[in-house]
Every structure is written in structure tokens, then in C-alpha cells.
Image: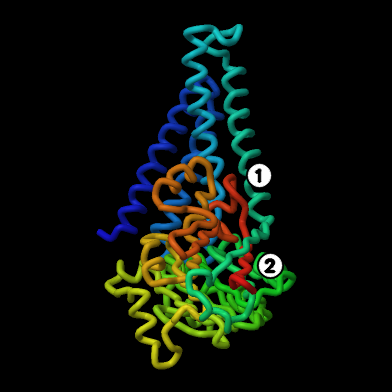
């Protein structure tokens, strides 16, 4: 079984356990409420099933029905997480209350009090979700300056003094993000006037978006307004693979954004850009070329980086960061982590990567791992902001 399948089933097991706990506590707490208890439990089961059913039956359901189930399932995830956390905290307080009488009326509580507790937990989880939904729709512009060239001496003097790089990662065009949101992002890019725009993977969310002709065409039209001086470039992300590599490339071919799959280019001779294929290719029987191998493959056409120009590596998933350092890259841009997106998922994500968000440096190589400008799953962010990243790459002494 592939690691992606194992991860999905592990997530599903945790998801099932959380919902079983919520269901058991709901059924117990609403004892004596008659038909209301049954209706509440049935509603919980219905929403809880939407997420796994949408994922498991995506390839056989009609597109409209799939989108409806997927949207309901994704909308449920955030209230479920925070409902679970608040219920767990409430249970701890309930147990303590039975021991030290925190309230004037220790358990067992009256029917009215128990109903009020259920509605309070529901309201609190919905308020957290609504705040996270607003946060997820208001992108921030994050700016950094990176100095380069000190380690490479006078050879760098022939390059431009500064190159402005815009990074867009994890856009996840799909059920919750389409041409309208994309227009907002492109508007931000236009106001920042970058020299080059880099799409660092997961531009689309699923195959349903690529099959939806009108939504796909509308997004392509918005992207067609991008005209940075050194071009717009993209690499594959894991979701771009899930959506279909060939269909994703076909979508980008309708725009000015050029896809790099283990390829290197040298826009206007001002920088060497290496676009790595996503690690997902290895799960489907393909192989990924090393950075030096990619550069060697294109040496006749573009020339190997010799330190006279900055070298930028695009790699969606920020694993094996030493690869870029060992190749002498100036900068690597990545995404994928979403900075965790939801608390407490961010605590787990932080343990999975050497660096899961932000600016980082190893030796002479700089890294930027973006939290992404879109969302996966629920259209909610309770950790971090969606971000458009602007990096001013300045040559030392310029």
C-alpha cells in the first residue's frame, strides 16, 4: 500500500474515533430529550459520513452530487474538530466538578443544563469556524529581502542588482476557490509588480475542477492577465497529481504559466530556475531527477549555474532540504504544509518537517516554505494567514 493510502486510512481512523466520541457524548448528554436526541444524532452521522463518502466515491459519483457531498463534508470538519476539543475540555471540567464542586450544582446536571451545554459547545465551535473562514479569505502579503552573492565573489557583478520574486503556493482551485478568489490574488500580484511569479505546487485541488469546463476556463482567463517580466512558472504538487498530471498541464497550457517537471530554464539569462517534479511521481512508479542531474540535462541549452547568477529551486514538499544546499542553490521555494492550517494540526505538522513555515537558511542556501494562499478541506484557517510571498533577491554590493 502506498504511503499516501496509508496516510488517508490513518486520518480516516482518527476521524472515525473523534466522531464516535462526539456521538457517544451527544447521545448520553441528551438523554431524556426524546425525538430531539435522535434527530441530533442522525444529523451528526449524516455530516460525519459526507467527508469519507466524498473521498471514496469521487470517481463514480456524478460531478454535481460529488461536489455537494464534498462541500458538506469539508464544511463539517472544522466544527467537528473544535466540537471534539471543547467537549473533551468540558468532560475534564465535569469530572473535576464531581470531585471538588467547581459549580454550585455538581453533576448529574438537569436536562435543561445538559441541553444548554450542547448548544454552547455547538455555538463555540461554529464561532471559531466562522472566524477561521474569514481569516482564510483575507490573504496577507509577506515580504522578505534575501542577500546573495557574498560567497561567490566578483562573478556575481554581472547580474541585476535586484529581482523581485512572487511565490504563490497551495492555491487549491476547486470547491471553495475559483476565478473570483484568483482574481483577488492576481490583483495583489499586479500591485507588487514582481519580475517573476512562481507557483510552488497544488495549484488545483482535484479532478472535478479540471472537468468543470466553465470554472476551469474562468480561472485560465484570470491567469492569462499575468505578464511578469521573467515569466510565470509552476511545479507539480501532490494534488496536481491527484487531479491528473496531463490534465493539469493542459490547463496551464491555456495560460501564460509554464510548467517545469524536472526541468531547468534561464529566464532572460538573469537566474537559473530549477523546477523539480513532486515526490508523488515516485508513488505511481515514476522517478524524480536530482537537482544536479536536471542541470546537467539542460547544460547544452542553458549552461550550468556557476555562481554568476542566482539559482532558484522550486520543490513543492519541503523534504530533504540538504539537496538544494548541496547543489549550491541560492534559494528554494516550497509549500505543501499549509503551516498546519487548523489548530492543533499545526503542532503535528511542525514535528514532520525540518522547517514547516517561513524563511530558513542552511549554509549559503535560503529557503522559504509558504503557508499557501488557499486551503485544503474546510475553507477555514485558525493558524496563520493565507499569503502572497514577495522576496526581493538582492546581490551583495548592489
Name the disc covering residue 56, or none. none
Q: Residue at x 41, y 46 (%)?
A: 351
User: Which residue is the extreme one toward the front?
Assistant: 154
Q: Position of residue 117 (x, y in %)?
A: 59, 24
Q: Position of residue 116 (x, y in %)?
A: 62, 23
Any part of residue 68 in sight:
no
Q: How many marks?
A: 2
Residue picked out by circle 2: 180
Question: In the picture, which quadrant includes the N terminus?
Answer: bottom left
Quarter of the image holding residue 164? bottom right
On screen, 110 above or below 244?
above
Tell which of 107 and 3 is nearer to you: 3
Q: Residue at x 36, y 67 (%)?
A: 323
On screen, 232 above or below 9?
below
User: Which residue is the extreme one toward the bottom?
Assistant: 300
Q: Residue at x 65, y 68 (%)?
A: 182
Residue picked out by circle 1: 130
N-terminal label among 2 and 1? 1
Amino acid at each position: 500500500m502506498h504511503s499516501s493510502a496509508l496516510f488517508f486510512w490513518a486520518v480516516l481512523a482518527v476521524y472515525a474515533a473523534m466522531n464516535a466520541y462526539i456521538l457517544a457524548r451527544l447521545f448520553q448528554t441528551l438523554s431524556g430529550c426524546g425525538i430531539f436526541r435522535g434527530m441530533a444524532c442522525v444529523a451528526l452521522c449524516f455530516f460525519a459520513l459526507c467527508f469519507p463518502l466524498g473521498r471514496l466515491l469521487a470517481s463514480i459519483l456524478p460531478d454535481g452530487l460529488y461536489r455537494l457531498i464534498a462541500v458538506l463534508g469539508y464544511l463539517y470538519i472544522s466544527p467537528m474538530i473544535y466540537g471534539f476539543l471543547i467537549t473533551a475540555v468540558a468532560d475534564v471540567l465535569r469530572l473535576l466538578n464531581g470531585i471538588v464542586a467547581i459549580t454550585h450544582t455538581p453533576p448529574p446536571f438537569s436536562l435543561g443544563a445538559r441541553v444548554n451545554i450542547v448548544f454552547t459547545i455547538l455555538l463555540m465551535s461554529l464561532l471559531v469556524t466562522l472566524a477561521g473562514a474569514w481569516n482564510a479569505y483575507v490573504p496577507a502579503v509577506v515580504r522578505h529581502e534575501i542577500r546573495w552573492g557574498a560567497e561567490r565573489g566578483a562573478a556575481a557583478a554581472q547580474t541585476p542588482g535586484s529581482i523581485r520574486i512572487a511565490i504563490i503556493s497551495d492555491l487549491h482551485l476547486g470547491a471553495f476557490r475559483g476565478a473570483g478568489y484568483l482574481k483577488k490574488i492576481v490583483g495583489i500580484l499586479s500591485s507588487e509588480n514582481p519580475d517573476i511569479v512562481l507557483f510552488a505546487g497544488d495549484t488545483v485541488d482535484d479532478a472535478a475542477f479540471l472537468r468543470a469546463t466553465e470554472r476551469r476556463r474562468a480561472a485560465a482567463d484570470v491567469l492569462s492577465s499575468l505578464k511578469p517580466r521573467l515569466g510565470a512558472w509552476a511545479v507539480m504538487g501532490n494534488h496536481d497529481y491527484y487531479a491528473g498530471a496531463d490534465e493539469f498541464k493542459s490547463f496551464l497550457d491555456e495560460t501564460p504559466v509554464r510548467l517545469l517537471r524536472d526541468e531547468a530554464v534561464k529566464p532572460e539569462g538573469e537566474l537559473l530556475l530549477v523546477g523539480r517534479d513532486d515526490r508523488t511521481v515516485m508513488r505511481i512508479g515514476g522517478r524524480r531527477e536530482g537537482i544536479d542531474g536536471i542541470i546537467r540535462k539542460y547544460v547544452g541549452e542553458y549552461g550550468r549555474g556557476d555562481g554568476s547568477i542566482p539559482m532558484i529551486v522550486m520543490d513543492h514538499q519541503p523534504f530533504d532540504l540538504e539537496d538544494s544546499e548541496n547543489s549550491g542553490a541560492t534559494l528554494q521555494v516550497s509549500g505543501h504544509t499549509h503551516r498546519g492550517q487548523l489548530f492543533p494540526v499545526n503542532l503535528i505538522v511542525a514535528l514532520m518537517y525540518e522547517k514547516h513555515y517561513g524563511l530558513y537558511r542552511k549554509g549559503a542556501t535560503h529557503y522559504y516554505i509558504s503557508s499557501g494562499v488557499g486551503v485544503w478541506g474546510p475553507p477555514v484557517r485558525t493558524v496563520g494567514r493565507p499569503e502572497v510571498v514577495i522576496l526581493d533577491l538582492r546581490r551583495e554590493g548592489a
